[in-house]
Image (spheres, grey):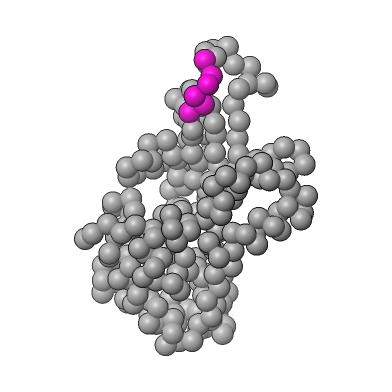
Amino acid sequence: MTNVTSAQAQEQLPGWTVVDGRLEISVRAADFTKAIEFVNRFADIAEGMNHHPDFDIRYNTIRIRVVSHDVGGLTDRDTAFAGELDKLIDEMELKRQPKKISRSHLIFVTPNIDAIKPFWKAVFDFKEAEGSGQTDMLVDRSDVLSPIRFLQRPDSTIPVDDVDPSDGPVSMHVDVFVPAEFAVTRMQAAVEAGGKIINQADAPSMWELADLDGNRVFLRSQQPSD
C-alpha cells in the first residue's frame, strides 16, 4: 500500500473529486431499484477488494466517499477501488453529479484549545480524529456530521480563567470544501447573494468570505497545482 497525494488521485481519476483529502463521487440512477442494484454490485467489489467505502443513498442518488481510514489518507488502494467503481458506473450508465459534492468543517480559533475542546467533544459526543496532523480535530463517530477543528490563536495571552464566555476572545468560522471546477462559480454566487470577499490571496484554492453580519467562511478547493 502506497500513499497517494490529492493531486495524484485527482489526475488518475478525473471522474471523481478530491474533497478534504477523500475521493468522492455522486451518481444518479434511473430509479430506486437501479440505485439498489448499483449498491449491491459495488458491495461485491468492496468485499472482493477488502476495502469498504462510506456511502449514502437517497432514492436514486448515491454518494460515495473513499479513503484509507487506517492510515488517515489516500492510498493506491483507494484509487484502485475507485477505478473499479468507474467501470461499474459506466456499465450501468449512471449520471455523475460533481456539483453535489461538498464538505464543511466547523472551526474554532481559540487561545486555549485544551480548555474548550472537551466541551465540544462532550456536546456532540464526537471522538478524537485519527491520523497524522489531526490531533486538534473531533469527528462524528458515523462520519455524517461535519468535523470540528481547533486552531490556536497565536496572538492571545489572555488566561482562560479570565475569559468571559459572553465576550471572550474565541472566534468561529466554517470551512466549505467544493470541487475545484466549481470554486469560482460558488464564490461568485456568494458575493452576488450579499457576501464580501475578505481575502483572496490564495485564490482559487481559498477565498475568505463574510456575510453582512461579518460571519466568516473559507471556501476551499483542491486545485490541480496544489
Q: Can you tell which quarter of the image residue 91 is in?
A: bottom left
- State whether residue 141 is above or below residue 168: below
x and y percent of residue 146 in the render? 53, 48
x and y percent of residue 10 in the render? 41, 65
x and y percent of residue 215 in the render? 69, 39
Please count the marks in the image. 0
x and y percent of residue 150 in the render? 49, 34
- State whether residue 31 is above or below residue 126: below
- The magenta region covers 152-157
Q: Quadrant of the C terminus?
A: bottom left
SS majority, magenta: loop
Q: Is residue 164 inside the magenta stretch? A: no
Q: Nearer the viewer, residue 35 or 4?
A: 4
Task: Specify whether residue 214 is in view.
Answer: yes
Residue sitting at x 61%, y 46%: 200
- State whether residue 28 is above or below residue 177: below
Residue sitting at x 69%, y 57%: 188
Q: Is residue 155 inside the magenta stretch? A: yes
Residue sitting at x 72%, y 37%: 214
Q: Can you tell which quarter of the image residue 139 is in?
A: top left
Q: Quadrant of the N terminus?
A: bottom left
